[in-house]
Image (cartoon, helix red, strand yellow):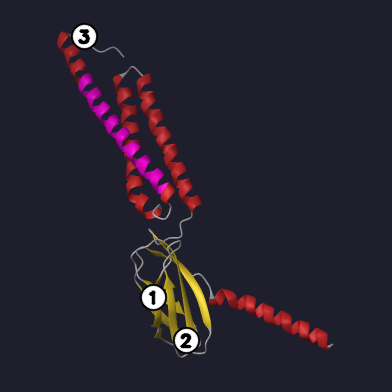
Amino acid sequence: MVVLKMRLIYIILIAAICISLPLTSAFLGVFKQNDCVNIVVPLNATTVILTNVNTPSPNSTIIISNKTMTSGVNLFNYTFCNTSTLGTYTYGYCDNNGNCYGNDFLINGSGQDVTQSQVILIIIGLVVLFIFAMFFFILSFLFQHPGTKIFFMALSSLTLIILIGIVTSNATVYLAEFPTLNSFYNNYYILMTILAGGAMMGLIVWLIYYSVTLFNKTRTGNHYDD
């Protein structure tokens, strides 16, 4: 009977520890680069000391140490603003009863929890649009009628311009924390800019050529035959 009671006590203690772990070391959240982060601690204590805040690995250093947190009703806060470095920051804190805890938070370019898988899906979508742009551009050379050529050239150029807009508005936000994908994205942007510029120049040259040709045919009394 005594052994059974001891086992029951051990089970209760283990369950209590498992339940309390998420409460004392829960992930604080994701925040935007260069924004201030409110490190909030819910503890039943009179004083809480922020013992350390460490910059992200691999060159992790302590940038805050032994700061008294602002107290509230079982809630303590410290406003941390040195968030220029991207990555996961770790911090520790202790209450007046000698209990110490640890936690962390993530700093990225958007302040949103963006995974690498989501970024890869975005890039795949952009590649698909790029393929459509090239398809329209190639298709423009398969038609003899100038109007059809102009239509597909314009469609190709418009698709590339849309891609450039998407890249410029999202690259620095969503790819800042993924250096390899960011490098790929930048090269992709340069390629699209060159192709869009070439497509627009080709469209302008074709319009000039078509206008001159149509003018000469009209002038000589010959009408263009579809």
Give how far across and how far down residue 8 sits, in percent. 76, 83
Q: Are marks 3 and 2 in contact (CB under 8 Å)?
A: no
Q: Earlier in the sequence, mark 3 or mark 2?
A: 2
Residue in the foreground of this view, choosing between 147 and 101: 101
* Residue occupying image coordinates x 27% and y 26%: 202
Could you tell me if residue 29 is visible in this image? no
Secondary element under disc 2, as helix, strand or loop, is loop
* Residue occupying image coordinates x 36% and y 27%: 137
* Residue occupying image coordinates x 43% and y 80%: 50
Amino acid bearing label 3: Asn
Give the residues in magenta: 181-210
Task: Say left or right for 53 vs 201.
Answer: right
Gap in angstroms between the C-alphas marked 1 and 2: 23 Å
Amino acid bearing label 2: Asn
Q: Which mark is residue 74?
A: 2
Q: Which mark is residue 11?
A: none
Secondary element under disc 1, as helix, strand or loop, is strand
Other residues around mark 3 within 10 Å, as few (<14) / some (14–19) / many (≥20):
few
Residue underneath mark 3: 222
Res 7 quadrant in image: bottom right
Give how far across and how far down residue 212 sits, in percent. 18, 18
Q: Nearer the viewer, mark 1 or mark 2?
A: 1
Q: Which mark is residue 64?
A: 1
Give how far across and how far down residue 94 sits, in percent. 48, 83
